[in-house]
Image (tube, coloured by chain):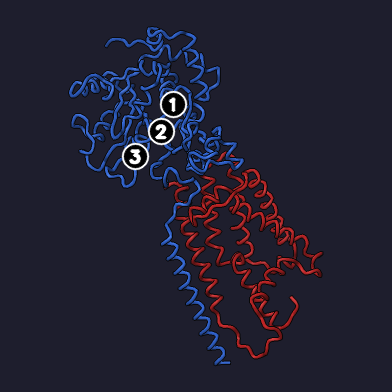
Amino acid sequence: MKQKPTLGEVLQAKGVSRRGFLKYCAATASLLALPPAMVPRIAQALEAARRPSVIWLSFQECTGCTESLTRSSSPTLEGLIFDSISLDYHHTLQAASGEAAEAARHAAMEENRGNYLVLVDGSIPLGNPGFSTIAGISNVDMLTETVADAAAVVAIGSCAAFGGIPGANPNPTGAVSVSDLVTDKPVVNVPGCPPIPTVITAVLTQFLTFGQLPDLDHYGRPRAFYGQTIHDRCYRRPFYEQGRFAETFDDEGARKGWCLYKLGCKGPITYNACATVKWNQGTSFPIESGHPCLGCSEPDFWDDGGFYRPVSTARIGGGAAFGTAVAAGAAIGVAAAAMSRRRQQKTIKEG
Amino acid sequence: MELLDFARGPALQFGLYAFVIGTVWRILGILLLAAKPDHSAARKAGGFMAALKVIYTRSFTADAFKQDTLYPKILGYLLHIGLFVTVFLFVPHILFFKGLIGLEWPGLPNNIIFFVGVITAGVGVALLVRRLTNPVLKLISNFDDYFSWLVTMAPIITGIIIPIRFGVRYETLLAVHILSVALLLTWLPFGKLAHAFLVFFSRGTTGLVLERRGAKT
């Protein structure tokens, strides 16, 4: 088998300067909350790393995660590093199709047994194998076969991580997440709809550098990126504390950039790095553009009571249920009073 | 189901229904009770105004007791005002009420709410200490007193902790806070906390009775 070029060689061939490369390494160390002393180690490891084989499986998804990673407005070093991995199978991006594509997947699995990474976007339908197939293979069969000899699995996006929109109530396809099915391999969840591209490449970088996956939270998300809420790092947080809120999308508060809590912002209960890493090369994030956070990196965000309902709104039944409660209380109260009156009359008669 | 989903879903729902059922039950159960047989003529004609007068005048201490009851009276007022401010003037709470009854009103900045919350918690602790150290008060206190104190203070204390965190995740603290509110709502109509709505009926009734006897109120 032909020896694959190292990442350093690939980046050098693409004209990436040493300074630019080290800047990326420093930024990645910072993002991963690693000490500055780790920067040379990251650089050394990345330069020497052979192009890792990556198999990207797309199941019940919208391709938004792939778009997020590939549709940057200008080439970034993250993009170049992503280009530099050996993406041996990705049915949206690869030129091959049909049997040739499947042959490429099998070849990559065979040649890199035990060492390749599997990136998955989209949830897996269990309701009926025919709900989603690739080359006639059901999603669950393809996932099971592909991860069997993988080093690790990265679930990209909320659909792969938690079931996402396909898994939303009433979940007609019986969609499940990757971690529901893969229990014998390390699984890293990188949720978001879509996830931040930098987060995806940083997870890959950590794996290439240290040969291990990042520290994860109870949802399997890298703590370095999902350790704090959007609300904690939001630049509009002072307005929340001052009690200054936008009431509508075009009122004075909205124009002045006040807190979007009343408009349904899920920032207080959403763990993601949008407020710090931001999108489009650090340009902005949804709240900065005037829209509340939807909480897309949290499980079941689609079913969380409505995008524009404030976090503190109760998830309880409507007026009919309260009417029933009032009627029940009245019935018990009348019955209790009647019993008391009977007792009173009996006492008077006896007394 | 996550703890937060459980807290703001089934748990809060149970608490609210228990509160509504219990409140209507207690109020109707008392209002529909038969009046005692009346064998004497009224010295003064009792009326609605007599009831209102006592509801108002009993909010203040009689001159003879002012000095002796100053400390608990101040604490009591602080506690109730603090509860009112933290429950009804915190913007996320207002949005909760808006979701329930459709009404909204202006709130206060969070730092004021936090300050009032801390004062209220401190006052609550002071009242508990007084209950435990005053021999008479301790003697007449029962489970209802201590449990009512606990379910009242729990939402205040858990609410104060939310912005501080102490390393605990926000949604966990929020869930615990909502669960404590659900417990408060469930207990409120059935224990001594029912004074929240019965106080006006009891004072009003006292006013009517005293008016009828011609007593100075």
Upstream in the sequence, badge 3 or badge 1?
Answer: 3
Labels 2 and 3 within one chain: yes
Residue that carries the numbered disc 2 in the rendered image: A192
Mark 3 surroundings: few (<14), some (14-19) or many (≥20) residues within 10 A = many
Is residue A254 placed above or below A40 in the rendered structure? below
Q: The chain drawn blue is chain what?
A: A
Residue A99 placement, left or right of B144: left
Give me the C-alpha separation between circle 2 and circle 1.
10 Å
Q: Colour of chain B?
A: red
Residue of label 3: A165
- Residue A329 relative to residue B43: left or right: left
Q: SS of the residue at dot 2?
A: loop
Q: Which residue is mark 1?
A: A199
Residue B186 or residue A312, whichever sits in front: A312
Same chain shared by disc 2 and disc 1: yes
Residue A184 in sight: yes
Q: Given the image, on which type of amino acid does mark 2 rest?
A: Gly
Q: Of helix, strand and loop, which one carries label 1?
A: helix
Crowd tier of the residue under label 1, counting other residues whose Cα lies within 10 Å: few below 14, some 14–19, many 20 or above = many
Q: Chain of mark 3?
A: A
Tell me whether the residue at label 2 lies in contact with that at label 1, contact meaning CB atoms closer than 8 angstroms. Answer: yes
